[in-house]
Image: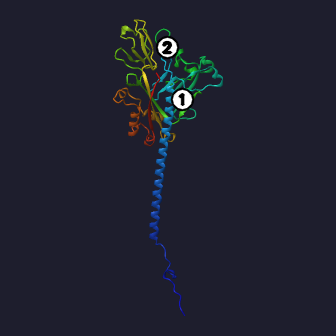
Amino acid sequence: MESAFIPPKNRPGKISGFTLLEILVAVSVLALLVLFVTQLTNSTSIVVTNSSKHLDADSQARMVFDRMGYDFAKMFCNSNVDCIFSKNAQNDAMFFYSEAPAYYSEAERSAKCGLSLVGYRINTNNTFHPGNAVLERLSKGLTWDGNASANGRGGPMFLSYRAGSAPDPASTIAGNWSSTVGTAENGFSDGSDTDYTVLSADVYRMEIVFYLTDGSFSTKPVANPSATLNKLDATGPPSVTDDLGRGYAPGSRWFDSTNGAAYYCVTPTTGAAVWRRLGLRDVSAIGVGLAILDSTSRKIVSDGSRMVGALADPAPDDLLQNPPKLMAKTWLEAVTSFQTGAIPEAAARQIRIYQRLFYLPK
């Protein structure tokens, strides 16, 4: 009788398997692999998210600058027509006339003229963006009848003068602000109007400088010709006594820092000097700087005013450097070194800085 042969591995009592040590090693290796893959996924997600934020910021800046470029290209630069470039302690604002398209109601279209009141400002009190600073654009279509009380629009403000050199308030944008746009506060950076629209919800800082006809940059829209006596630190408009006896001559410049208005001397007759608003006659181009921070990053900033103040206004001495130190360089230095007040580093890393120079039609 022959006995059956049973291979060693199949014999009873000889069951093979992994030892406890082998299982522990395998589990440890698996855990390390899972950890590595998780970290790699998180890192990839962070990189993709940051790249997406930067691309969104680039897209918004391009859209804003394209819109500004069109408005400036269509700007009405006649020195007899008023404009406002309000230089504030932090965010600036600007309002001017342009042939850019604007808003009209159906009833107003029959009286509309070819000019619009266009403006840009940073608003911290937008109803749809509470607690956030947003960039708004005003595009108010004007009518030839000039009847602001009837339709809340009015016509373009052509500067007129009574006695002296200060224009008649009724011929200025500021003098008609409450009836044509809305309550004015903080250098026209506040106020309500249905023709304001949010141009970018992520732009929280806007600063402007002037590129003058003499090739220099300045925070004031007025040159300082050496051939004449000029006063660029006045706190009010010139008067009839700012005349030849005080050293002023035809072409002398005057800047009223209180109202942000520049003047030039027409006639320096003693006791009867004539000064007129300069407008943008001395300005070749306007430089605009923007700072963009996405809404998610803003949530970790406890004080929005510090976020704005951390990016300083350009200093006059910086603008006189060769090459001039404009907003972008100043702001990038602040963001790069994180010397930005109370802004957390995580938010500061997401701030994007942009700058462009817009040449004005002449």
In which image quadrant can residue 113 be found?
top right
Tell me where residue 35 appears, x and y as whole percent: 46, 58
Place of residue 349 in the rendered image (x, y in percent of width and height, measured from the top left): 43, 41
Disc 1 marks a residue whose amino acid type is Arg
Residue drawn at x 40%, y 29% as measured from the top left: 314
The crowd level at tag 1 (other Cα within 10 Å; few <14, some 14-19, many 20+) is many
Q: Which residue, given by chain and number where applicable, does mark 1 sit on?
A: 137
Q: At x 45% / y 70%, what residue is drawn?
A: 22
**Residue 167: image tag:** 2
The residues bearing labels 1 and 2 have C-alpha atoms spaced at a distance of 27 Å
Q: Picture coordinates of residue 267 (x, y %)?
A: 42, 9
Tell me: 233 left or right of 299: left
Q: Closest to the observer: 309 or 116?
A: 116
Q: Is residue 189 visible?
A: no
Q: Is residue 24 above or below residue 194?
A: below
Is residue 188 positioned above or below 50 on the image? above
Are there few (<14), some (14-19), or many (20+) residues within 10 Å of tag 2?
A: many
Residue 261 image point, x, y percent? 45, 19
Q: Tell me, yes or no, whether the two marked residues, 1 and 2, touch with CB atoms within 8 Å.
A: no
**Helix, strand or loop for disc 1:** strand
